Image (cartoon, coloured by chain):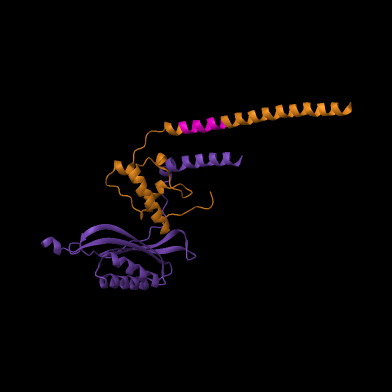
Amino acid sequence: MAEAQKRLVREYETIYLLKAETPDEEVDEIKERLRAVVTREGGKVIRFTNQGKRKTAFPIAKNPKAVFMHCLYIGNPGLVGEFERNLKMIDQVTKFQSVRLADGVDFEARQVEQDVKVTAVEDEARPREDRSEYSERPEESFGEAAEIGEE
Amino acid sequence: MARPGESGGKFGGGFGRGGGGDRGERGDRGDRGERGDRGGEEGGRRGFGRRKVCRFCADKTLKVDYKDQGQLKYFVTERGKIIPRRISGNCALHQREVATAIKRARMLAILPYTVASA
């Protein structure tokens, strides 16, 4: 019954947003605090990714920018609740979202990876012509519908 | 004598107006019909476009990822609306995934819920 001894857990990822003015030390502090939470609950952090300070689609806490942090971890279902409860208690965290990625992950087999820090991609000009194919037509038809509605 | 004449005049006028109204209505209907046809033409033109293939089915390695802003932008109008399947060409399965991904991205302020000015 070797298989019964294999500890199967779930893989989750949580993205949390920090206030843009959060200093780097505090970002690391929060990271370590969350890592401790995951470990305490019998989980394992695979890696943290600092996606850097990015522009948000709409202002959050009256700030157009936020620090995006991504955390990949494995653990039991109860872990997510505890993780999110801790996020709520940290004042710097403005938003967070957890998603289940996989079921039945072998706890021992999953290796811990290095923390990654990605430099923020300042909104570089994306090729617009690729989009036009999709974006123009619906706008056109919506315009037409609006015209009929007015009369 | 004056009274019947007046009334008759009114009557006739009434008819006339009624007729005019009728014609007006018909004119309206005609207009509407034309507009409807125009709409139909547009629908037809939309049908002319080549049949699009689901890009996620065409490229199996491609995964729908709610964190990837650049990828999701293809499935959102400039207004921030999700582009329907008949236009994006996605298959049902992947359109569903894309829609979920867009909604997740919105919650994390990666994509906007709306864009105020057009």
Residue A11, compared with residue B75, is above or below; it is: below
Q: Which corner quadrant of the image does residue A97 belong to?
A: bottom left
Instruction: Give the residue displayed 39% in from the left and 56% down from the top.
Output: B104
Q: In the rendered view, tell whether residue B38 sits above or below residue A39.
A: above
B100 and A140: which is toward the camera? B100
Is the stretch drawn in magenta largely helix, strand or loop?
helix
Give the drawing colour for chain A: purple
Q: Position of residue B15 (x, y in %)?
A: 74, 27
Q: Residue placed at 47% from the left, 41% from the top?
A: A138
Q: Which chain is orange?
A: B
Q: Estimate the x, y position of residue B107 in percent, counting from the top left.
A: 42, 58
- Horizontal arrangement in the rendering, residue A4 relative to residue A61 (left or right): left
Q: Report the magenta residues as a range.
A: B34-44
Query: Could you say which quadrant of the image residue B29 lies in?
Result: top right
Could you tell me residue B50's position as x and y percent? Answer: 38, 33
Q: Left or right: A27 with respect to B118?
A: left
Quadrant of the rendering where the N terminus of chain B is positioned = top right
Residue B61 horizontal/vertical position (percent): 27, 47
> Magenta segment: does it hold B88?
no
Residue at the image position 64 percent from the left and 28 percent from the top: B26
Q: Is residue A101 left or right of residue B23?
A: left
Between residue A70 and residue A37, name the one nearer to us. A37
